[in-house]
Structures are given as structure tokens and as C-alpha cells.
């Protein structure tokens, strides 16, 4: 385990980078946003990140971060109504380094009540651990002062072979449903059957390099959050033979292929080259505040939110 300075924020607070390793897997984590900056398996990068804090701040502040507390749909609604600011975003804070060892690091964040109108304080911790058999385990825990929508998740972008096109990747997701807007005068989120749709990934699906045909969906995996992770997705890269299995306790899973990230700064200029990748984000669902029997993104005082997600490489 090594710790080094990764630069400073505008207020001169220092961002630290912690590198952990076990077996053939290594991970570099930042105290800014609890970002997974780099993930390497068998000497190859398998996730997309930047080499400077300036690139994160100016171009993709949530890349590889723990984001939340709410989902994308609620974020947009709150921003439109002026209820949400950067102060409530987990990804835009400097987290506290609680502890670190050769193969594990724990970070925590406490957002005071003055930054969270009408909801009081929010607390969240994130532990990255590299377990035996080349597995990156992410454990999230959270608590609140007042009832709040609480849907944190890891917002990473993967590419199991950055030297090859995304079309060399295949994915399967064992989900029978996905979230869809109902038709009608008052739309609401409903579960739609994946059968007969482009969203059916129960069989192997080859990822698409062209934006017009790429998939973007929030999948219904199960009714409730689990205590022990279950299989949520399998990705295989054909040229290297690398396989990544995603196991999670979460009832929902957001999948997006063809995510484009700028390469980063080259001297004083931002490279316009982009790197393609895909996102697999286990989370609660639905993303909004609609009240359904299957809504599980509400955290109440006295409750402890727990999530465990594992990325298993072979």
C-alpha cells in the first residue's frame, strides 16, 4: 500500500491517492469523491481514469466516483427546482481517509445539515477491498438525520482492453425487466418485460461501438436489496480472454455502453481523443420519488444503508 499526493483543490485542500494490491489486481483510489482512478488486472488497465486532479475537476468530476445521494432522474428534477447543489453530491467532496492497508482502504464523508436543506446531515462510508481471486469489493454504508432519498452507487467506466474497440466485448445481464415510463397523461416508472426488446441481454450481447445503436437502461434484477451479493452481469473481452463478473446486493442495475471519456490534458490543451467504455452500476430503484411497493431508495432515521458490490476478474 502506498499513499501519495494527487494535487490540490481550489481551496488548497490536498487530494491523496492510495494504491492497494493483491494477486493480479491493483487499484488506485482518490480521497476526492472516493474515485477509483485506476484499476489494473494482469498488468492492463481495465477502467478509465485521469492522470491529474485538474482533469477530474474540469472535465468529468464524477468519473469513477461514488455518486448520489439521489438517482439521475431525481438529480435533474432537483436541479430544475433549485433544491440541489454541488454541496450535496458525494462525488464533489473531499472524503476522509479512515484507514488503509495493503489490500483495503476506507473513506468516509459527513455532509453537515446546513448543506442539506430539509434533510439534516448525511453520512456515508466506502470501503474498497481487493479480496482473493482478483475481486474488487466495494462496500457502502449510510445514515441520515431525516428521511431522504438515498441511492449511492459506483460510477465507473470500464474497458477490459483499451487497445481494442468496444465491439470486442460481450455482455449478459440476467434480468427479466427494465424500468420504463408508462404511457398516459401522468407518466410514472413501471417495470417492462425485456422479452422481444433490444434490452433483453439474458443471452450474450456484443457491445456496439456506434452511438446510434448503443444501449442505455436501468434493469430490474430483483424485488428487494439482498444481504449477500448475487450475479448481476458478466462481461467477456475476446482478444485478451478477460472476464469480469459483477455481483451485487442491489435490486437494480444501470447499464450504459459506449461511454466516451476525453483522454485528458496534454500540456495545456485537452486532448479531443476519446476512450470508449461501458458502465455497470448496481443501485436501488426506481430513480425517482414515485411511491411504489418496490421503491427502496428511501433512507429513514435509525436505519443503516448497506450495499456490497463485487467486480470479479479472471
Image: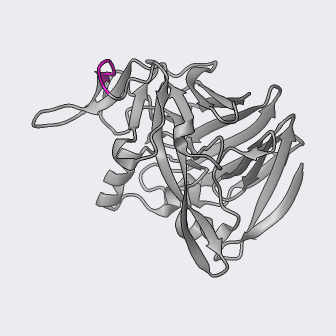
The residue at 36%/21% (across/down) is 177
Front position in the image: 135 or 116: 135
- For this orientation, the residue located farthest to the front is 239
Residue 145: give x, y in percent of width and height.
Answer: 53, 43
Highlighted range, magenta = 192-197
Is residue 112 placed above or below 22 in the rendered structure?
Answer: below
Q: Is residue 289 highlighted in magenta?
A: no
Of 58 and 199, which appears nearest the observer? 199
Residue closer to the observer: 119 or 16: 16
Question: What is the x, y in percent for residue 53?
Answer: 67, 67
Colour mapping? one colour
> For this view, does 85 lie left or right of residue 35?
left
Taking the magenta stretch, the answer to whether it contains residue 194 is yes
> Please, is residue 3 above or below residue 157 in the view?
below
Residue located farthest toward the bottom when viewing the structure as drawn: 268
The residue shown at (63%, 52%) is 48
The overriding secondary structure of the stretch rendered in magenta is: loop
Counting from the top left corner in percent of width and height, residue 133 is at 80, 25
The total of numbered circles placed on residues is 0
Q: Is residue 32 above or below residue 167?
A: below
In the visual, does 79 lie left or right of 170?
left
Q: Quarter of the image containing the C terminus? A: top right
Question: Looking at the image, can residue 299 be seen?
Answer: no
Q: Residue at x 47, y 42 (%)?
A: 257
Residue 305, by quadrant, is top right
Amino acid at each position: 500500500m502506498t499513499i501519495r499526493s494527487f494535487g490540490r483543490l481550489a481551496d488548497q485542500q490536498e487530494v491523496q491517492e492510495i494504491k492497494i494490491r493483491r494477486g493480479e489486481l491493483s487499484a488506485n483510489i482518490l480521497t476526492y469523491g472516493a474515485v477509483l482512478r485506476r484499476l489494473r488486472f494482469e498488468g492492463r488497465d481495465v477502467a478509465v481514469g485521469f492522470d491529474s486532479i485538474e482533469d477530474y475537476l474540469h472535465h468529468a468530476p464524477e468519473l469513477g466516483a461514488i455518486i448520489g445521494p439521489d438517482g439521475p432522474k431525481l438529480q435533474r428534477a432537483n436541479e430544475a427546482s433549485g433544491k440541489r447543489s454541488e454541496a450535496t453530491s458525494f462525488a464533489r467532496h473531499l472524503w476522509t481517509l479512515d484507514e488503509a492497508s495493503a489490500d483495503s482502504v476506507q473513506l468516509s464523508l459527513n455532509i453537515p445539515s446546513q448543506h442539506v436543506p430539509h434533510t439534516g446531515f448525511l453520512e456515508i462510508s466506502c470501503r474498497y477491498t481487493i479480496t482473493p481471486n482478483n475481486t474488487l469489493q466495494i462496500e457502502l454504508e449510510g445514515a441520515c438525520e431525516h428521511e431522504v432519498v438515498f441511492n449511492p452507487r459506483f460510477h465507473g467506466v470500464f474497458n477490459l482492453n483499451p487497445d481494442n474497440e468496444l465491439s470486442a466485448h460481450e455482455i449478459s445481464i440476467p434480468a427479466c425487466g427494465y424500468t420504463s415510463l408508462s404511457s398516459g397523461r401522468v407518466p410514472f416508472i413501471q417495470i417492462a418485460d425485456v422479452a422481444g426488446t433490444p434490452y433483453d441481454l439474458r443471452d450474450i450481447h456484443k457491445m456496439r461501438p456506434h452511438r446510434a445503436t448503443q444501449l442505455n437502461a436501468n434493469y430490474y434484477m430483483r424485488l428487494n436489496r439482498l444481504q449477500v451479493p448475487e450475479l448481476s452481469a458478466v462481461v467477456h473481452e475476446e482478444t485478451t480472454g478477460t472476464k469480469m463478473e459483477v455481483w451485487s446486493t442491489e435490486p437494480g442495475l444501470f447499464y450504459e455502453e459506449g461511454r466516451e471519456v476525453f483522454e485528458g490534458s496534454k500540456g495545456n490543451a485537452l486532448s479531443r481523443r476519446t476512450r470508449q467504455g461501458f458502465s455497470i452500476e448496481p443501485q436501488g430503484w426506481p430513480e425517482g420519488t414515485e411511491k411504489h411497493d418496490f421503491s427502496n431508495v428511501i433512507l429513514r432515521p435509525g436505519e443503516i444503508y448497506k450495499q456490497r458490490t463485487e467486480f470479479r476478474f479472471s
